[in-house]
Image: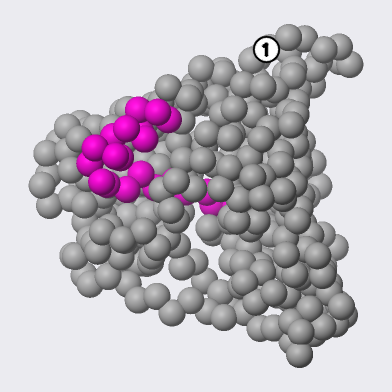
Amino acid sequence: MNPTQHTEFEPQYHEEKPVKKNELIMGVAGLEHGHIYAMCHGMKEAGATIRWVFDEDPKKIKAFQKVFPEARKANSLPQILKDKALHLISSAAIPSERCAIGLKALDSGKHFFSAKAPFTTIEQLRQAEKKVKETGLHWAVFYSERLQVECANFAEQLINKGAIGNVIQVLGMGPHRLNIEQRPEWFFWKKTYGGIICDIGSHQIEQFLWFTGAKDATILSSTVQNNTQPSFPEFEDYGDCHLIGDNGAVHYFRIDWFTPDGLSNWGDGRTFILGTDGYIELRKFVDITEQSIGERLYLVNHGGERKYDVSGKVGFPYFYQLAHDILNHTCSAMPQEHTFKAAELSLLAQQKAQFWSKGEENE
């Protein structure tokens, strides 16, 4: 039977095995963003041992050690870099500082695992590309809105099985809750956070490239706005972008900081994947009015309609694959070219974005 004429697919749980105990040792440098906890949990489940943690703020170190008590406090980044037993440095430092840490990590012979956004300028990206070529080491990026979402991993399985034919368009929506009183100063300045498309837009572009198989894309248009924060003129609370891939696939996404207080979580992130013979909708973090914490996938093709609840049924293979890649000098988790291309397109879209305020265009 043609795959697009039935919906009897079932999610397959990843079969990756963790690396052996103490075989992969990692250090952590930079605790500015909460993504570092998910990154470390994922790598720990994949068998990694967290040996060191460093941040300029001792309170952040104490909070981290409550979750990962095995991590020793380092007095400086060089102290971690000098540990020859380490294989990997993970970082969620201030976005503009992540590249410098990564360069030092690779110079010391260690792989690097960055929170998104990995770079805030094209110059930083080019430095990272050059360093990876020189060293042959990994510069991984935690694009969590795909890598840590089970329904996104199931969508990949469905696409590979031909459930919706050839993917021709991806529509992404990435709303977030601002929680302004909890945000640090760097969050509001373009030099340190990069802009809304550079930051949370990188999730959307990475997914587009991955689901469509595009290797590159052209930015057709992009827009950013500051609707609500006049005290922070460089902050952007809305962004969107329209791209076309080198294989003809099309992408549009919208990102914002307008999640209302009435929503049960931080953001109703959704992705729609259109194929020649059907479509998929991902309700990643919440399925409103359905008492769902998310991880719902809706499939429609010639065979009918089906709703899947995939929580706990797919897992997160990326961390296991990355752990084995580091030890085996392979690249199964994510091609380095893909990692950097998602970042590059995010930066280019940010550069090209037209800024609009109260209905008036500003260059």
State the residue in front, 328 or 15. 328
- Residue at the image point whose x is 40% and y is 42% from the top: 114
Q: Residue furthest front?
A: 247
Compared to 279, does 113 lie above or below? above
Residue position for label 1:
233
Q: Residue furthest bottom?
A: 1
283 sits to left or right of 181? right
Magenta stretch: residue 38 in it?
Answer: no
Q: How is the image coloured?
A: one colour
x, y (%) of residue 266?
68, 47
70 sits to left or right of 232? left
Secondary element at tag 1: loop
- Residue at the image point whose x is 45% and y is 56% from the top: 334
Compared to 30, does 231 lie above or below? above
x, y (%) of residue 268?
74, 51
State the residue in front, 202 or 190. 202
Asked whether residue 103 is in view, the answer is yes
In what quadrant of the picture does the C terminus appear? top right
Q: Amino acid at mark 1?
A: Pro
For the record, the magenta segment spans: 125-145
Compared to 13, does 247 lie above or below? above
Compared to 287, does 315 lie above or below? below
188 sits to left or right of 354? left
- Residue at the image point whose x is 71% and y is 38% from the top: 243
x, y (%) of residue 35?
48, 46
Q: How many marks?
A: 1
In which quarter of the view is residue 152 placed?
Answer: bottom right
Magenta stretch: residue 144 in it?
Answer: yes
State the residue in front, 236 or 211. 211
Report the predominant secondary structure element of the magenta stretch. Answer: helix
315 sits to left or right of 302? left
In what quadrant of the picture does the N terminus appear? bottom right
